[in-house]
Image (tube, grey):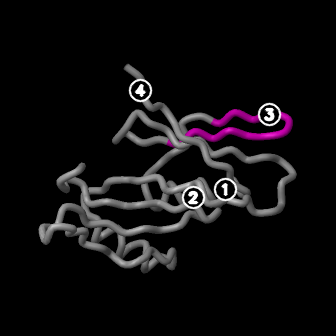
Amino acid sequence: MAKLIHSMIRVLDEDRSVAFYRDCFGLRVAERLDFENFTLIYLSNDETGTELELTVNKGRTQPYDLGDGYGHVAFSVDDVDALHARLTEAGLAPRKLVDFAPGGEVIARFFFIQDPDGYEIEVLQRGGRYL
């Protein structure tokens, strides 16, 4: 069996990205590795053993081209409505809450938000049919 341990994204501004993931999802720096040309920052919380790796390439000033292959990363939360309200009040512009009911029955409640580098994040209500 294989175990997912982390996913990596490239970011321009370490402080801005660390603050975003801390404030939105409670992720904290678990480890920070500084090298000559780049820095790796591993974020995690007590909810999961999986980490989000932020890679900062030193000297880069232009935003990354996310292309058309990236989809999204997803977080589940205990109260999606409360988090949506908090993020809206903080000016982080989450998209509208969606009740996903393809067969007439709601099977998921979620919203999307973009991080400071434009990565899509899906935020789902924990306890839904697929969580």
Q: Residue at x 32, y 66 (%)?
A: 110
Q: Is residue 32 above or below residue 64?
A: above
How far apart, in angstroms, are the residues tagged by discs 4 and 2?
Answer: 27 Å
Q: Mark 2 points at which residue?
A: 19
- The stretch of residues the image draws in magenta is 32-43
Q: Is residue 68 left or right of residue 131?
A: right
Distance of label 1 from label 2 (alpha carbons)? 6 Å
Cα separation between marks 3 and 4: 27 Å
31 or 55, nearer to the observer: 55
Mark 1, residue position? 15
- Return the x and y of residue 54 as percentages of the image width and height: 63, 45
Q: For the stretch drawn in magenta, what is the main secondary structure?
A: strand
Residue 20: horizontal and vertical position, in percent?
Answer: 55, 61
Residue 9: horizontal and vertical position, in percent? 62, 48
Direction front: furthest residue = 103
Nearest to N terminus: mark 4 or mark 2:
4
10 Å crowding of disc 2: few (<14), some (14-19), many (20+): some
The quadrant of the picture occupied by the N terminus is top left
Q: Are the residues at dot 2 and dot 3 in contact (C-beta closer than 8 Å)? A: no
Q: Name the residue under label 3.
A: 35
Q: Mark 3 or mark 4: which is in front?
A: 4
| Marks 3 and 1, the one that precedes in the sequence | 1
Asked if residue 22 is positioned above or below residue 30 in the image, the reply reads: below
Q: Is residue 46 above or below residue 63?
A: above
For this rendering, which residue is in front, 99 or 82?
Answer: 99
Front label number (3 vs 1) = 3
Q: Mark 4 points at which residue?
A: 3
If you read the primary sequence from the N terminus, does the residue marked by circle 2 or circle 3 appear first?
2
Q: Residue at x 41, y 26 (%)?
A: 3
Q: Tag 4 or tag 3, which sits nearer the N-term?
A: 4
Which quadrant of the figure has residue 50?
A: top left
Q: Residues within 10 Å of mark 1 (few under 14, many from 20)?
A: few
